Amino acid sequence: MSDMKPNEAPEGDENGEEKDWAAAKAFFENLKTNKPRPPKPRYAVTIAVSSRTLFNMVAERKIYEEDGMEKYVAYQVEHENEPLKPGAAFPFVKALMTVNARLRELYPDSEELFDIVLMTNNHAQVGVRLINSINHYDLTIERFCMTGGQSPIGYLKAYMTNLYLSKDSEKVTEAIEEGIAAATMFMPETEIKLSDTQLRVAFDGDAVLFSDESEIIVKQHGLDTFFEHEREFENKPLAQGPLKCFLEALGKLQRKFYAKNERMNCPIRTFLVTARSAASSGARVLKTLRSWGLEIDEALFLAGAPKGPLLEKIKPHIFFDDQMFHIEGAKELGTIAAHVPYGIGQKYHRGKLIEQPAKDK
């Protein structure tokens, strides 16, 4: 998988880039505005969200699928002064902004902030409605990438993306294959009250934070062999999974609060919610995180019990899991869930192998 910032500039270009950025920053700082300027991408934690995750565009999508692109664009232009309704990623984005506000209080000149980018394959004509909707909700989103029907995945590394959220599972899979943390978002079936003072992020373990190496053993050889394997390799760290880099980015920002003696009031809280059993296979997980130099605020080992009821108590702004049946159980109880299409688990549903279509010879 890629490092946290996958597209660092060559060392020889750094001085020129620094001068260009300093000049641009000085220009913007001399302009009078109450709106915070975006941080420098090199230092920011960049979250790229699609328009259909940030806003609820189900009706608009139906027009596109049934009547085609021209009718879709015409409808968006005709209704561009009507704000779109919030989508699955909206509470998450608002929570990111809350963290930024706290960071700016403690570090007024710091560039280490969340930077939210709207990454969409919408036509630029639709951009006016998106801009109007963002301004209506007072969202701090200054960077747009509108690709006019083309896939935006090729731009993710150029934007130094730490996390990409979309409704399109094929694009998410493509992003993961490019080494970028990504997930497909789903709206919950019921709405619950979320924290407006703390960003709460919940992760599954295997095939999300970690690789699917242990999951392969479970699927192919059963739980007893899995338990034996985990005990034997307890002191060998698991390989990283597709979202390890995002947890790392969250940890970087958490430590900025700890440095100001704000650990107990930190506006970021992370959760590990895993189907693993603590006594039988939990030690390797915790030792892996320790070997990476990462902390998790709460580790919850469920030993195969459903995750939905526990997530209903945690109330995360986003929950990442590689298994669709966990996603379904979570969203039924009001959790905003994000599917990570990675690893051997994609070939199974509720423990049963999904019949794969025959490949053409």
Image (cartoon, grey):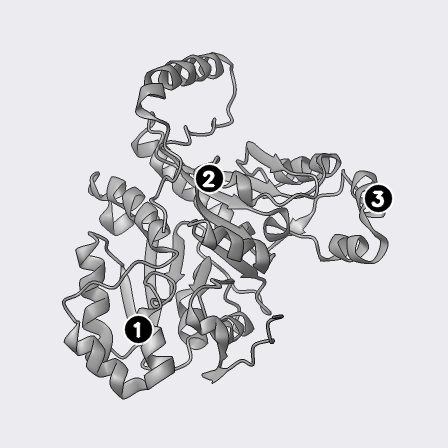
Which residue is painted at 30% across and 49% down in the image?
248
Q: Nearer the viewer, residue 246 or 30?
A: 246
- Please, is residue 151 above or below residue 237 in the view? above
The amino acid at mark 1 is: Ser
Pointer 1 residue: 214
Q: Are marks 1 and 3 in contact (CB under 8 Å)?
A: no
- In the image: residue 237, left or right of residue 174: left
Q: Give the CA distance from mark 2 to mark 3.
A: 30 Å
The amino acid at mark 3 is: Glu
Closer to the eye: label 1 or 3:
1
Numbered tag placed on residue 70 in the rendering: 3
Whichever of labels 1 and 2 marks the residue nearer the N terminus, that label is 2
Numbered tag placed on residue 157 in the rendering: 2
Q: Quadrant of residue 184?
A: bottom right
Q: Give the CA distance from mark 1 to mark 3.
A: 48 Å
- In the image: residue 294, left or right of residue 103: left
- In the image: residue 308, left or right of residue 146: left
Residue 17 lies, in percent from the top left, at 39, 19
Secondary structure found at label 1? helix
- Please, is residue 236 above or below residue 259 in the view? below
Which residue is painted at 44% across and 55% down in the image?
195
Residue 25 lies, in percent from the top left, at 43, 17
Which residue is painted at 20% across and 63% down in the image?
237
Whichever of labels 2 and 3 marks the residue nearer the N terminus, that label is 3
In what quadrant of the picture does the C terminus appear? bottom right
Q: Are marks 2 and 3 in contact (CB under 8 Å)?
A: no
Residue 254 lies, in percent from the top left, at 28, 46
Is residue 106 in view from this perspective?
A: yes
Closer to the eye: label 2 or 3:
2
Q: Give the CA distance from mark 1 to mark 2.
A: 29 Å
Is residue 275 in view from this perspective?
A: no
